[in-house]
């Protein structure tokens, strides 16, 4: 790859040399040609918008697969959040005479995505404590027993997650 070329030319060269391979790899990985095509495009879009992605890239295929795997994880997280939200929404709608507006639904999905982003950046036990408390409704003692930590540690985990959420909200 010619790194002395303009960034868009370098991405163009990377695309020309590796898109077909990446698409085939993704198609085998996820088993869906449409999803593979979308993810391949997302990988190259991520490289396009990243200013430093091409600097020092020695192994393009390794970089592309790592980027693709991260995007797949992000996509799976969003799908899990969306399914969870839709399931909760269905339960709630059964009990409500009024349906939420599309704007309210969008705001809720955006909030869930922000929470998922926050949870991706906290330690695993903190994330698990947060999910057990706020999604499963477990108390601190029950969470402590499941995680093998003290209730004090559970409180610390929850405070840490909530502070991270507050930081994202403030930005």
Image: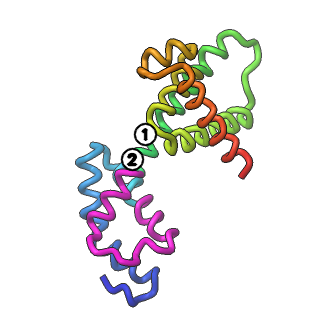
Q: How is the image coloured?
A: rainbow
Q: Residue 50 appears at what percent x and percent y?
A: 50, 69
Q: Residue 5 appears at what percent x and percent y?
A: 40, 89
What residue range appears in magenta?
Answer: 41-70
Label disc, if present, on residue 76 of the rendered structure: 1
- The N terminus is located in which quarter? bottom left
- Residue 55 is covered by the magenta coloring: yes
- Residue 67 is covered by the magenta coloring: yes
Vertical placement of residue 12 versus 164, above or below: below
**How many marks on residues?**
2
Vertical placement of residue 160 versus 99, above or below: below
88 sits to left or right of 12: right
Determine which residue is flagged by label 2.
72
Q: Residue 154 appears at what percent x and percent y?
A: 54, 24
Image point (37%, 48%), residue name? 35
Image point (42%, 51%), residue name? 71
Say which of 133 and 58 sits in front: 133
Say which of 128 and 21 sits in front: 128
Q: Residue furthest top?
A: 95
Image point (69%, 9%), residue name? 95
Image point (31%, 66%), residue name? 19
Label 1–label 2 contact, CB within 8 A: yes
When asked about the image quadrant of residue 101, the answer is top right
134 sits to left or right of 149: right
Label 1: state its secondary structure: helix
Q: Give neighbour class at mark 2: few <14, some 14-19, many 20+ (Cα, 10 Å).
A: some
Q: Determine the main secondary structure of the stretch shown in magenta.
A: helix
């Amino acid at each position: 790859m010619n790194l002395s070329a303009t960034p868009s030319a370098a991405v163009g060269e990377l695309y020309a040399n590796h898109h077909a391979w990446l698409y085939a790899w993704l198609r085998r990985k996820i088993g869906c040609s449409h999803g593979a095509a979308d993810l391949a495009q997302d990988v190259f879009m991520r490289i396009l918008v990243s200013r430093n992605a091409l600097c020092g890239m020695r192994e393009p295929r390794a970089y592309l697969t790592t980027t693709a795997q991260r995007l797949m994880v992000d996509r799976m997280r969003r799908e899990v959040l969306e399914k969870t939200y839709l399931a909760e929404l269905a339960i709630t709608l059964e009990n409500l005479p009024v349906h939420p507006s599309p704007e309210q639904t969008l705001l809720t999905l955006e909030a869930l995505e922000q929470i998922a982003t926050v949870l991706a950046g906290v330690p695993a036990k903190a994330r698990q404590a947060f999910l057990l408390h706020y999604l499963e409704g477990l108390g601190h003692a029950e969470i402590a027993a499941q995680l093998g930590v003290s209730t004090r540690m559970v409180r610390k985990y929850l405070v840490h997650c909530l502070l991270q959420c507050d930081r994202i909200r403030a930005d």
